[in-house]
């Protein structure tokens, strides 16, 4: 289950998807929208994505995780469009026979998402808006 | 050859369009297409961020040689999560 969506994310559906008789653990990661970033007061985030490729990349991340750790199933859903403060922008769920593999694969997935998946966040803050670049959370500017 | 180019995020805003179709000569690389787009769309001319290239939903190098009907996306630094 690898999706981008303009709707909300149903974590119950994701848990049902990764549920597995061979699993002794399910680990979830929920990325949420915080109200501050680098000294700015954040009002909301607005995500834009290249859906076909984003879903393909999410699936690739899962395949890579399956090579590195002994996991059963993975589900990743990322929101597109406006996401309000406290709301989830991304949820990852991983099941594994043992918790160590589930934790590590989940961590791997979120770090990879921030590196390779074609999704961009625009930060709407008090006083303006700016596209955020790469993992650092700092804005990038194009000289005009 | 006809190439479909999609723009996202800051590049979409700069170009003022999400998608354009371009005619290119046989043997044109994706890097050369970017160079010609920068000439055509002045607001792209000064883009200094590091871009990745994607063709048909896969990352490729700048030396990828375009094929008819390829779908090209220039990927600014991603920031999902």
Image (tube, helix red, strand yellow):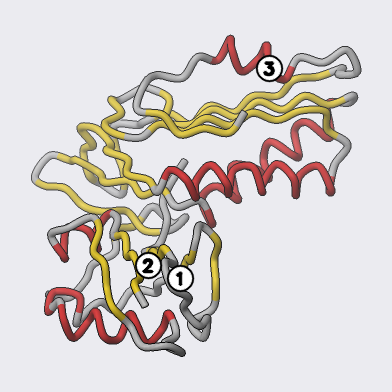
**Quarter of the image with the C terminus of chain A in it:** bottom left
**In which quarter of the view is residue A36 placed?**
top left
Mark 2 or mark 1: name the one nearer the start of the chain: 1
Name the residue at 17% across, 75% down: A143
The foreground one among A27 and A22 is A22
The residue identified by callout 1 is B53
Q: Residue beneath label 3, please?
A: A17
Alpha-carbon neighbours of circle 3 within 10 Å: few (<14), some, or many (≥20)? Answer: some
Q: Residue furthest left?
A: A127
**Numbered badge on residue B15:** none
Q: Quadrant location of residue B7?
A: bottom left
Q: Name the residue carrying label 2.
A: B74
**Chain assignment, label 3:** A
Q: Residues within 10 Å of mark 2 (few under 14, many from 20)?
A: many
Element under disc 1: strand
Relative to residue A132, is residue B70 drawn left or right?
Answer: right
Q: Position of residue A120 (x, y in %)?
A: 36, 49
Which residue corresponds to the image point at 41% horizontal and 63% vertical from the top-left? B71
Q: Nearer the viewer, residue A31 or A113?
A: A113
Question: Dot 1 surroundings within 10 Å: few (below 14), some, or many (20 or more)?
Answer: many
| Tag 2–tag 1 contact (CB < 8 Å) | yes
Residue A68 drawn above or below residue A43: below
SS for dot 3: helix
Q: Is residue A5 above or below residue B63?
A: above
Tell me the chain of label 2.
B
Q: Nearer the viewer, residue A115 or A63?
A: A63
Q: CA distance from mark 2 to mark 1?
A: 5 Å
Q: Residue at x 42, y 56 (%)?
A: B78
Residue A61 percent across, percent down from the top left: 66, 47
- Point out residue B72 in the picture as x, y percentages from the top left corner: 40, 66
Image quadrant in which the N terminus of chain A is located? top right
């Amino acid at each position: 289950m690898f999706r981008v969506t303009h709707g909300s994310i149903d974590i119950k559906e994701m848990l049902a998807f990764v549920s597995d008789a061979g699993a002794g653990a399910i680990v979830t990661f929920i990325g949420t929208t915080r109200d501050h970033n680098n000294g700015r007061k954040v009002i909301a985030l607005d995500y834009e994505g290249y859906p076909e490729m984003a879903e393909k990349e999410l699936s690739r991340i899962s395949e890579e995780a399956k090579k590195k750790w002994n996991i059963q199933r993975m589900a990743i859903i990322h929101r597109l469009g406006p996401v309000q403060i406290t709301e989830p922008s991304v949820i990852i769920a991983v099941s594994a026979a043992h918790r160590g593999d589930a934790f590590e694969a989940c961590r791997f997935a979120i770090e990879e998402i921030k590196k390779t998946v074609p999704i961009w966040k625009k930060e709407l803050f008090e006083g303006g808006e700016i596209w955020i670049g790469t993992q650092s959370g700092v804005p990038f500017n194009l000289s005009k | 050859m006809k190439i479909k180019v999609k723009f996202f995020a800051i590049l979409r805003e700069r170009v003022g369009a999400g998608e354009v179709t371009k005619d290119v000569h046989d043997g044109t690389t994706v890097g050369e297409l970017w160079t010609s787009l920068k000439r055509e769309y002045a607001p792209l001319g000064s883009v200094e961020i590091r871009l990745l290239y994607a063709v048909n939903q896969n990352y490729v190098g700048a030396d990828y040689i375009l094929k008819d009907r390829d779908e090209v996306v220039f990927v600014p630094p991603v920031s999902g999560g």
